[in-house]
Image (cartoon, rainbow, N blue to C red):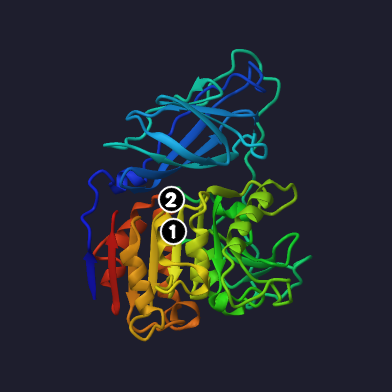
């Protein structure tokens, strides 16, 4: 077992900075809010990734007061940082002053509800966090403000979290247009909010596998009771081995493992293996980026079990073998915050129409996993890791071969590594970061070798 950090960690990016959280409460006044409304908010600012001269961040807003219909969040960057790309909102910036307003689909925040957005930015020198935020013109100060007059409406209660149903032993194969959800085997969770610093790998929610609403191009794996998760869920879009775009049966076990940890996973295959008009055998990266669009629509669709349950500022692509090529290309999308390539890599001769020059377009941290010398993708995986310029991890399990992570005896170890990397990258979780980058985590396990750079 060996852990080789091939680059010294940037001193400006500590675990504390990655997981930096700013929490405050304030009275909210301004558009669409009664002057006598009870007000309060909590803002979470997380640096999800950082590379020389650039960074990614996610911002969550939780409304602690009366419902808000239309929001505007403002802050000042302390070191001249500049937003270069933002999603799930609209931004303007004048010098260090930033204003972000809601998108058309996420302007309403009920009492106890949350919205989030993400962005990429640039910086010179240091990248300190903003000191304070203001919601609809009033600074968040750390509590719920009392109204100066009787409020016109009482705050609505936060939704009650109920225990998940007892799972069945096998997932059902239900038609894609009207799927019958069936939970996969996992013990029922305690019905309470998940602490924000709890590592996702410690979760084990019952999972529902179902066809995507409105299309049979995707299969969705999600916690059966989204309210039991206690917070909005990150999204992972996944490309299958052999670029299988109809039959995704070989990944059911692996993707159920990930979804049980609190992710919503959208896989590029029909739920029952039926024809869906998509050819298999060659990479179609747009299937993954279109899956992000599907998740955006579901998050905004009334009646969806995922309505306002997704955190679209925390999105990742992943894939196995040929599907890993799809993940690496789709990972260039600005909505993506992390990439995982399993037993895969772009070819030196540009096979499948994508050259290794595409790797220079990645803008987020990436994790490469391979199954050792017997893995047909072993050389490609290593070469791709060497070429990327973003923060990267190369994790190798010498006995996994080409399929051990997906349906072999190394599945649990491999999917644990995936969950921990995504928790580190999307959430800034310090425990997950230690597991991936530290000498006593993944690198300490038998038959594993871990290298990292640019963190």
How far separated are the C-alphas under marks 1 and 2?
Answer: 8 Å
User: On residue 422, which mark appears?
Assistant: 1
Q: Position of residue 125 (x, y in %)?
A: 26, 37
Element at label 2: helix
| Residue farthest toward the right in the current orientation of the protein | 178
Indicate left or right for 6 with 256 as reference. Answer: left
Of the two numbered discs 1 and 2 on the same chain, state the one appearing first in sequence. Answer: 1
Given residues 344 and 361, the one toward you in this image is 361
Indicate left or right for 133 with 436 as reference. Answer: right
> Residue at label 2?
427
Q: Position of residue 372 (x, y in %)?
A: 34, 81
Q: Position of residue 386 (x, y in %)?
A: 31, 66
Given residues 376 and 191, the one toward you in this image is 376
Dots 1, 2 in contact, CB < 8 A: yes
Q: Residue at x 36, y 68 (%)?
A: 384
Q: Residues within 10 Å of mark 2 (few under 14, many from 20)?
A: many
Q: Residue at x 51, y 20 (%)?
A: 138
Q: Quadrant of the N terminus?
A: bottom left
Q: Is residue 313 visible?
A: yes
Q: Quadrant of residue 190?
A: bottom right
Q: Residue at x 63, y 28 (%)?
A: 66
Q: Is 305 above or below relative to 284?
A: above
Element at label 1: helix
Q: Is 142 above or below relative to 308?
A: above
Q: Residues within 10 Å of mark 1 (few under 14, many from 20)?
A: many
Given residues 35 and 95, the one toward you in this image is 95
Q: Residue at x 25, y 65 (%)?
A: 440
Q: How many marks?
A: 2
């Amino acid at each position: 077992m060996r852990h080789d950090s091939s680059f010294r960690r940037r001193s400006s990016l500590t675990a504390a900075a990655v997981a930096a959280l700013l929490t405050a409460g304030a009275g909210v006044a301004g558009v669409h809010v009664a002057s006598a409304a009870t007000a309060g908010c909590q803002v979470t600012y997380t640096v999800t990734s950082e590379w020389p001269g650039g960074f990614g961040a996610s911002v969550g807003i939780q409304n602690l007061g009366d419902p808000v219909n239309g929001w505007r969040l403002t802050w000042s960057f302390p070191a001249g940082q500049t937003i270069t790309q933002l999603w799930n909102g609209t931004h303007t910036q004048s010098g260090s002053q930033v204003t972000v307003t809601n998108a058309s689909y996420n302007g309403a925040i009920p009492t106890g509800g949350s919205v989030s957005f993400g962005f990429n930015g640039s910086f010179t020198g240091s990248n300190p966090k903003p000191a304070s935020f203001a919601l609809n013109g009033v600074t968040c100060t750390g509590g719920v403000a009392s109204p100066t007059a009787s409020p016109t409406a009482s705050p609505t209660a936060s939704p009650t979290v109920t225990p998940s149903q007892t799972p069945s032993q096998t997932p059902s194969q239900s038609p894609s247009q009207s799927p019958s959800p069936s939970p996969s085997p996992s013990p029922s969770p305690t019905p309470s909010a998940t602490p924000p610093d709890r590592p996702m790998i410690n979760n084990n929610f019952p999972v529902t596998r179902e066809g995507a609403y409105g299309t049979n191009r995707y299969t969705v794996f999600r916690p059966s009771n989204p309210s039991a998760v206690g917070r909005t869920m990150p999204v992972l879009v996944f490309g299958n081995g052999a670029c299988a775009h109809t039959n995704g049966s070989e990944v059911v076990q692996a993707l159920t493992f990930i979804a049980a940890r609190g992710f919503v996973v959208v896989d590029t295959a029909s739920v029952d293996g039926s024809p869906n008009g998509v050819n298999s055998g060659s990479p179609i990266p747009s299937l993954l980026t279109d899956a992000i669009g599907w998740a955006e629509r579901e998050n905004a669709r009334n009646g969806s079990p995922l309505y306002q349950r997704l955190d679209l500022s925390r999105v990742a692509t992943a894939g196995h073998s040929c599907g890993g090529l799809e993940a690496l290309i789709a990972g260039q999308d600005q909505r993506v915050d992390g990439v995982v390539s399993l037993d895969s890599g772009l070819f030196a001769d540009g096979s499948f129409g994508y050259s290794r020059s595409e790797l220079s377009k990645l803008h987020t941290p990436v994790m490469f996993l391979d199954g050792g010398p017997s893995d047909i993708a072993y050389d490609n995986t290593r070469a791709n890791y060497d070429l990327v310029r973003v923060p990267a991890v190369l994790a190798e399990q010498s006995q996994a071969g080409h399929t051990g992570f997906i349906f072999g005896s190394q599945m649990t170890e491999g999917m644990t590594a995936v969950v921990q990397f995504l928790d580190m990258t999307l959430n800034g979780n310090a425990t997950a970061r230690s597991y991936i980058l530290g000498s006593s985590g993944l690198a300490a396990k038998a038959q594993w070798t871990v290298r990292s750079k640019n963190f």
